[in-house]
Amino acid sequence: GVCSCRKRAELFCYVHRKAICSSCILDHPTCVIGPYLDWLRDSDYELPTCPVCSGNFDETQPTVRLTCLHIIHPNCLDHYASQLPAHTAQAGYGCPTCSKPIIPPEDDKTDLANTLRDVLEVQDWTKAFLSGGESSSSSNLNGIQSPIIDNSDGSGTRDPFTF
């Protein structure tokens, strides 16, 4: 299909019944979005609810659209992610609906991914993944602290059996 902005579109807004591109998806903050072929197979849909609080979405409330196309309230996303253990790897932060990664991969340069990164980078739980900052003197790989053993010889080698 072709989006109203004249870009090629593989996504479809079920609510407005029109093709949308990956840039214009941001203009549909509370709509049900999916691949056009899925809509052709089954055009029935239910208005989405927040997977954390089960609340409805409306145009007056802020929402976050994840790259898996699910939407969630920003505060609910922060609450959900903050409940995970501090040592959770980046891939462990999954969508509460489908478990696909919440944090977009670095090579995803779509408007949706960039907007999502902007929203996520201010959250405490994403700082190690999106800002690339070290959080202490021990090595930090994707936000996970590498345990350091204080050997008697002072080598400070990493313990391969401690996670």
Image (cartoon, rainbow, N blue to C red):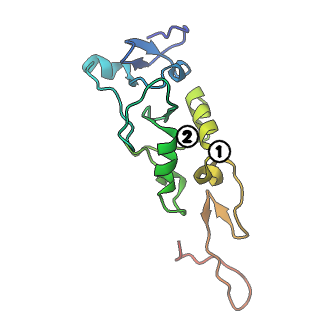
Nearer the observer: mark 1 or 2; the answer is 1
Residue at 69% x, 52% y: name it: 132
In the depicted view, which residue is nearer to us: 53 or 161? 53
Residue 160 vs 85, above or below: the answer is below
Q: CA separation, marks 1 and 2? A: 15 Å
Mark 1 surroundings: few (<14), some (14-19) or many (≥20) residues within 10 A: few
Element class at badge 2: loop
Q: Tell which of 93 and 148 is nearer to you.
A: 93
Q: Which mark is residue 23?
A: none
In the figure, is residue 117 to the left or right of 51? right
Is residue 37 shown left or right of residue 29? left
Q: Residue at x 25, y 21 (%)?
A: 44
Residue 88 position in % (x across, y down):
51, 59
Query: Disc 2 residue type?
Result: Pro
- The x and y percentages for residue 41 are 26, 20
| Residue identifier under label 2 | 104
The disc labelled 1 sits on which kind of residue?
Val
User: Compared with residue 85, is residue 75 higher up or lower down, i.e. above or below?
Assistant: above
Q: Quadrant of residue 36?
A: top left
- Which residue is tagged 1? 122
Query: Where residue 73 appears, x then y in whole percent?
Result: 47, 37
What element does badge 1 sit on? Answer: loop
